[in-house]
Image (cartoon, rainbow, N blue to C red):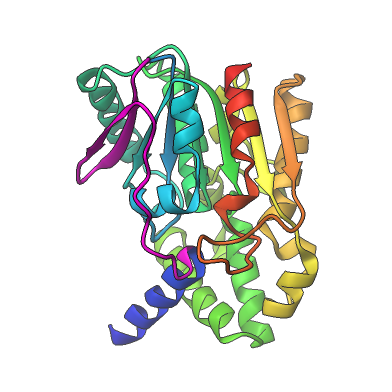
Amino acid sequence: MQKYIIILILIVMSCKGHSKKNNQTDYLKSEIIKTSEYQLIKAEKQKGLLILFPCFPCDAENTLTEFKIADISVANNFSVLAMNLNQRLYLKPEEKQELSNQLTKIINEQQLNKNNIYIGGFSSGGNVSLLISDYLVKNKSLVKPKGVFIVDSPIDLLALYQTAEKNLELNYSERAIQESKWIKHMLDNEFGNPQNGISNYEKNAPFTFKTQNINNLKGLKKLKIRFYTEPDLKWWNNHAKNSYEDLNAFYIQKLSEQLKTTFGNKNIQLIKTKNKGYRANGERHPHSWSIVNEKDLVNWMLE
């Protein structure tokens, strides 16, 4: 037990960094509501809603500390709903239903805009964003997203497993080793060893590059989609001896290409950044919320 507590701590540090305490922010003319489920920055004028999902060990507070989106969103009459739902690389069918009900309840209780909704997430939160958006559309929910975006998310769970195996073989970085042990252990328990079949991976992942499987995303055809990533090969090589094919960025690019081919529209954007990835404490890390330009994102939502 102590072993896995240590591993979880390392993963928390990897995703969250050592963030400084969130400075008190004046979210312009807004109402701030905090519950165990979410933090809501409610704009005075309701013209839109941005729903955000955190990374695996993170929460709403971390999201709003690392992603400086609230002020500019509220200034443009978009409320920001930062969810505490975490520790999800995928969503089980019952979890999709529960989350759909939860979002519907929050939006109704808080009298939020239902007609201009965007959903996005960082790291594993991006997986959640894609899967729940697909579910909401396919099930004709009252919550109808217009667009969805992800920030350097591990969308291919089979590839994530294989990269973890590679990291363990390389035995290069202690942080990469511990995180890879945890990933492999979790996926072995959830879906089994891929050598015995990959159907469970295909069934639950947003994307499986090996088979070009996008069954969990076909509901997104009419939505605006953005993929953010910062493929800093030098950084990843120095820290974990990873190549491009080991990075989330590789599979995000392949998914972007596959969706453009399948959907045949121009609503899909792949945004690759350079030297934008920094944590709130100033730590350089390409796997960060900061690769998203907040002003440009809001303009995209307003289009």
Q: Is residue 15 left or right of residue 166?
A: left
Q: With respect to residue 173, does 60 lie above or below?
A: above
| Residue 59: x %, y % from top left | 35, 53
Based on the picture, tell me whether residue 41 belongs to the magenta stretch. Answer: yes
**Where is residue 100, by image quadrant?**
top left
By secondary structure, the bulk of the magenta-drawn segment is best described as: loop
Based on the picture, tell me whether residue 50 belongs to the magenta stretch. Answer: no
Is residue 98 visible in the rendered image? The answer is yes
Q: Is residue 137 left or right of residue 268?
A: left
Q: Residue at x 63, y 67 (%)?
A: 284
Q: Residue at x 41, y 79 (%)?
A: 7
Q: With respect to residue 204, does 175 lie above or below?
A: below
| Residue 72: x %, y % from top left | 51, 32
**Where is residue 39, by image quadrant?**
top left
Q: With respect to residue 118, does 96 lie above or below?
A: below
| Residue 11: x %, y % from top left | 45, 71
Is residue 131 visible in the rendered image? The answer is no
Which residue appears farthest toward the top when viewing the image?
115
Q: Residue at x 52, y 49 (%)?
A: 122
| Residue 33: x %, y % from top left | 23, 36
Q: Is residue 217 left or right of residue 79?
A: right
Q: Nearer the viewer, residue 295 or 63?
A: 295
